[in-house]
């Protein structure tokens, strides 16, 4: 397992995988029991993984409770990330949801209790609530950082314009900086290429990527009628609903045959290579439900795609970048001087 700092704005050292603990527990009626969860945690740690990602609502709080027990013997070694917004219980109330300062503080205190720790390394705002002003969110997060109960903060599932505005506000106000983003990203969900990942690279934000296998679609198991997220949770999944997704799965399966790797390993190998091409950290969040699935993910660390294989997967999975990117692509050379040998130098201040 290799390591990197989480983005260019922190010195937080994280493993190249984050272990997603959404399947730790069975509160949702699907997931891994405590014994299997412990085995997955131990195997991840033995492989060198130190980055753990959970949330107050995962398995209605059971995930945090299990993670807390697992890290208790060596808490400071692990980078522990959790989230708030939706509430922890199956029937959250009006005062226990959203991103207000009130819910933020109460959610963190409850998470710390379940996790059995007095701080978290990374605290995520799980979703935008379209109600709470960004200034209130940032000021509340800054208070938590100054209290020592949170070390770094990030925004999960927020659009790029909100993240960039938040990062600017935090810098101007001298509040705790936005350290990273968390988004869905895989070979069957690459719309993050339009704004979110370029923004993260430009601002030096760490990026954690959830559902790297498209809810299991990229493993090819749904073609075999195998159970998975599609049949159990019936949410956060992809199906072969478009010709492009079918073409992507076909390409993954073909390259798996060529390499001798599993389709899951091919998909994650592409994702790791895609992340290596950026100037900031890009971390897949792996979310196994069994030790067998975790071993498949770990096996991807040894898979190397050829440049041709990487290019093939990139081409078939590419999404339209839309406006203004496609409209301006054709004029960039013109506005830079056409065929002239233009040297791009730093701008000179105007007196």
Image (tube, helix red, strand yellow):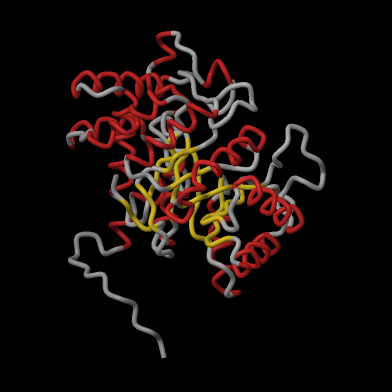
Spot the residue most to the bottom: 351
Q: Which residue is drawn at 19% across and 24% down?
A: 259
Q: Is residue 231 above or below residue 319?
A: above
Q: Quadrant of residue 262?
A: top left
Residue 106: x and y in percent read 73, 53
Q: In which quarter of the image is residue 255?
A: top left
Residue 323: x and y in percent read 47, 46
Spot the residue most to the front: 73
Query: In what quadrant of the picture does the N terminus appear?
Result: top left
Q: Residue at x 60, y 58 (%)?
A: 118
Does 290 sit left or right of 120 as displayed?
left
Report how many numbered discs are placed on residues in the image.
Answer: 0
Residue 143: x and y in percent read 65, 67
Does 255 sit left or right of 88 as displayed?
left
Pick the front one: 252 or 324: 252
Q: Which residue is drawn at 59% across and 71% down?
A: 175
Residue 313: x and y in percent read 29, 31
Query: In what quadrant of the picture does the C terminus appear?
Result: bottom left
Pick the front one: 202 or 96: 96
Spot the residue most to the top: 225
Does 214 sit left or right of 64 as displayed?
left
Q: Which residue is drawn at 30% across and 23% down?
A: 252
Q: Is residue 32 above or below residue 141?
A: above
Q: Is residue 287 above or below residue 17?
A: above
């Amino acid at each position: 397992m290799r390591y990197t700092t989480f983005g260019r704005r922190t010195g937080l050292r994280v493993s190249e995988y984050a272990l997603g603990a959404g399947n730790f527990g069975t509160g949702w009626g699907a997931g891994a029991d405590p014994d299997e969860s412990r085995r997955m945690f131990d195997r991840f740690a033995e492989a060198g993984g130190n980055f753990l990602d959970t949330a107050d609502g995962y398995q209605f709080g059971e995930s945090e409770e299990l993670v807390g027990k697992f890290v208790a013997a060596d808490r400071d070694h692990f980078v522990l990330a959790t989230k708030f917004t939706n509430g922890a219980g199956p029937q959250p109330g009006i005062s226990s949801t959203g991103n207000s300062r009130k819910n933020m503080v109460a959610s963190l205190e409850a998470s710390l209790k379940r996790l059995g720790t007095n701080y978290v390394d990374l605290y995520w705002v799980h979703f935008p609530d379209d109600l709470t002003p960004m200034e209130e969110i940032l000021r509340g997060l800054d208070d938590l950082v100054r209290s020592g109960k949170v070390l770094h903060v990030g925004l999960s599932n927020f659009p790029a314009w909100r993240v960039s505005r938040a990062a600017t506000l935090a810098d101007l106000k001298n509040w705790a900086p936005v350290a990273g983003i968390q988004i869905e990203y895989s070979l069957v969900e690459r719309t993050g290429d339009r704004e979110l990942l370029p923004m993260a690279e430009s601002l030096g934000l760490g990026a954690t990527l959830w559902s790297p296998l498209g809810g299991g679609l990229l493993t090819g198991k749904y073609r075999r009628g195998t159970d998975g997220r599609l049949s159990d949770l019936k949410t956060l999944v992809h199906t072969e609903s478009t010709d492009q997704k079918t073409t992507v799965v076909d390409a993954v399966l073909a390259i798996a045959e060529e390499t001798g790797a599993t389709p899951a390993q091919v998909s994650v190998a592409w994702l790791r290579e895609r992340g290596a091409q950026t100037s900031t950290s890009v971390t897949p969040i792996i979310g196994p439900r069994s030790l067998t699935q975790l071993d498949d993910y770990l096996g991807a660390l040894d898979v190397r795609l050829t440049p041709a294989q990487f290019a093939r997967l990139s081409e078939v999975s590419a999404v339209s970048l839309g406006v203004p990117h496609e409209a301006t692509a054709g004029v960039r050379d013109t506005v830079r001087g056409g065929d002239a040998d233009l040297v791009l130098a730093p701008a000179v201040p105007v007196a």
